Image (spheres, rainbow, N blue to C red):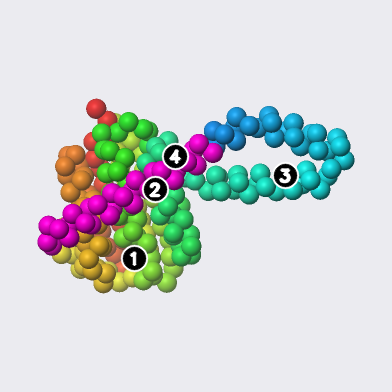
Amino acid sequence: MRKSTYLKLVRYQTEQSERHLREVRSIHGEMRGYKHDFHHHLQTLKGQLEAGEVERALAYITELDEKLTHVDALIKTGNVALDAILSAKLSQAKEEGIPVTIKANVPEGLTLSDVELSIVVGNLLDNAIEACREAEEKFLRIYMGIKGNMLYFSMLNAAGKKQRKQGSLFASRKEGLHGFGLRRAEAILEKHGGWVKYNSEEGSFTSEFLVPVIN
């Protein structure tokens, strides 16, 4: 890959990750705002009902419910960067009809930067979503947590036929960004003293990594 092309792809992924972070920080701000304004909402509803304005009160509740539904769609792991990328990618999975099971509890203040964490997890999820498209019965199961000073990630997703391994990665029908993305994830993890491994079986694919993230 040419250096100029590589740098463009790095810049693209970094910009995407930063955009996800901005979106989630905005949603977190909304959540704090709702908590702060909760008393005011109750007072408004109470006043409307006491005045007999039932229809107006119902419209007010409907508007609040729509906004809260948007906020509740955010995945909450304890880490804003992880919330950002998981919420974005799993929303995509849902749109494609992929059932998702996730258990994740990750603190802030990791030695991995927010952008690095977003790129690693985002690329692995892109790979999983792509693989699910080849499967008859789709599923995606994710676990993330801290073990000692290490971040552990495990993902099992549906896939088509068993893939042939090429080096540390597997062959893919998708060229370009696919292979680049997985190599980017691998490079970031190795830079921080971690590792990543994959396993392909008929109908499923497993991704797993372990990396030191706490001093």
Of labels 4 and 1, the one closer to you: 4
Please tell me which of labels 2 and 3 falls first in the chain.
2
Q: CA distance from mark 4 to mark 2?
A: 9 Å
Please tell me which of labels 1 and 3 falls first in the chain.
3
Q: Which residue is mark 4?
A: 25
The answer to whether the residue labelled 2 contacts the one labelled 3, judged by CB atoms less than 8 Å apart, is no
Q: CA distance from mark 2 to mark 1?
A: 23 Å
Q: Quadrant of the N terminus?
A: bottom left
Check residue 23 for magenta coloring. Answer: yes
Q: Nearer the viewer, residue 143 or 120?
A: 120
Q: Which residue is mark 2?
A: 20
Q: Which residue is mark 3?
A: 60
Three-letter code for the amino acid on which mark 4 is drawn: Arg
Q: Is residue 17 above or below residue 204?
A: above
Q: CA distance from mark 4 to mark 1?
A: 30 Å
Left or right: 2 as drawn, with respect to 25:
left
Residue at 79% across / 34% down in the picture? 46
Three-letter code for the amino acid on which mark 3 is drawn: Tyr
Q: Which residue is mark 1?
A: 131
* Label 2: how many Cα within 10 Å (few below 14, some 14–19, many 20+): many
Residue at 37% across / 62% down in the picture? 129
Q: Is residue 99 visible?
A: no
> In terms of secondary structure, where does tag 1 sit?
helix
Magenta-colored segment: predominant secondary structure: helix
Q: CA distance from mark 2 to mark 3?
A: 30 Å
Q: Which mark is residue 211?
A: none
> In terms of secondary structure, where does tag 2 sit?
helix
Q: CA distance from mark 3 to mark 4?
A: 25 Å
